Structures are given as C-alpha cells and as structure tokens.
Image: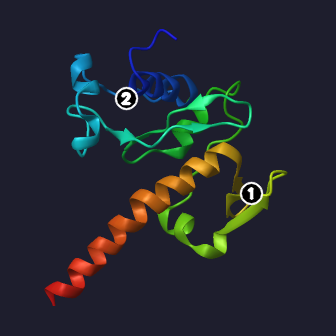
C-alpha cells in the first residue's frame, strides 16, 4: 500500500469510487498524532476511525468516518465509478436507527449480522456491520446525551 495512513487511503477510495475529492491536511503528523483525543481532523472532513474489523475473506479493514456535507445524488450517479459501485443511494440516519428497518441474517457460524433495509435498498455484509457499529457506538450515545441535556435544561 502506498498511502501514508488509513485516512489518506479512505480519501483516495472515496474519490476513486464516487468522484468526490476530500480535502486533507498535507502534514502527516496532523493525521497521526493522538487522533482519538481530537473530535475531528483539522482542515479536513475526516472525523475519525472506528475499530478495525476483519472481513470474512480475512482482509483487515479500518473504517474511517467523515462528513461529506450535502451531496447531490444525481451528480454522484454521473461521477460514480461503475466498476466499483453498482448504485448510489442515500438512507437517512432516522431510517437507519429505526428498528423496523433492521434485519438480522444468520451466518454459518451462528452469529447474527445486521442488514439495513430502506425501500428497495438493502445494506448488508461488512458495510452493514461497520455501519451498525457506528450507529451503536457513535450516533446513539450522542443522541441520548443530547436528549438528556434537553431534559435537564427544562
């Protein structure tokens, strides 16, 4: 791998697959120094990393979380690399957090794997596993903390 760090790799992949350029700091030290202690990466829209996970193929994957802002799905349909991506679609955080939209697939090892369903779209496999982890470890605690702060401010 020629990328300096996982964030650079993730940025390159987003550009290759979706045609969206992610601006990142040019100084590698900004990426690497105590990334867990900072809420975001300065001068970029990379928010941080989730814990590594291993695909069923044995490939080690480091999920990198970022904010891409408002995206025009019609533009992404035109810029997406069809060798990498079959279809571009969006599912809202509200839909992802709705238990009615979560299914569980039984794996051959007896483990349940989450899948997210919205309309005709289904997110499954390693992508769903990483997304589920993000929702449970990042989104839900943030929402609960925000709601608790609202309750106490009344």
Between the C-alphas of marks 2 and 1, the distance is 35 Å
Q: Earlier in the sequence, mark 2 or mark 1?
A: 2
**Residue 154 pos. (x, y %):** 16, 90
Residue 80 visible in image: no
For residue 111, the mark is 1
**Residue 102 pos. (x, y %):** 66, 67
For residue 22, the mark is 2
For residue 76, the mark is none
**Farthest residue, direction top:** 2
In what element is the residue under mark 2?
loop
> What kind of colouring is applied to the model shown?
rainbow
Kindly indicate the quadrant of the structure image that contains residue 103.
Answer: bottom right
Residue displayed at 23% across by 86% down: 151
Residue displayed at 67% across by 59% down: 114
Crowd class of label 2 (few under 14; some 14 to 19; many from 20; radius 10 Å): some
**Residue 60 pos. (x, y %):** 59, 30
In the drawing, does residue 52 fall left or right of residue 122? left
67 shown above or below 119: above
In the drawing, does residue 132 fall left or right of residue 66? right
5 shown above or below 100: above
**Residue 121 pos. (x, y %):** 71, 56
Q: Nearer the viewer, residue 45 or 35?
A: 35
């Amino acid at each position: 791998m020629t990328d300096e760090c996982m964030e650079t790799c993730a940025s390159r992949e987003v550009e290759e697959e979706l045609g969206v350029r992610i601006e990142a700091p040019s100084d590698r030290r900004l990426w690497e120094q105590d990334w867990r202690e900072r809420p975001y990466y300065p001068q970029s829209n990379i928010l941080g990393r989730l814990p590594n996970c291993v695909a069923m193929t044995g490939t080690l994957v480091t999920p990198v979380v970022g904010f891409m802002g408002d995206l025009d799905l019609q533009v992404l349909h035109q810029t997406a690399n069809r060798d990498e991506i079959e279809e571009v679609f969006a599912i809202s955080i509200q839909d992802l957090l709705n238990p009615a939209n979560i299914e569980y697939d039984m794996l051959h090892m007896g483990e349940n794997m989450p899948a997210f369903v919205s309309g005709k779209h289904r997110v499954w496999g390693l992508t769903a596993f990483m997304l589920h982890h993000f929702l449970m470890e990042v989104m839900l605690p943030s929402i609960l903390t925000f709601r608790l702060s609202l309750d106490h401010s009344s």
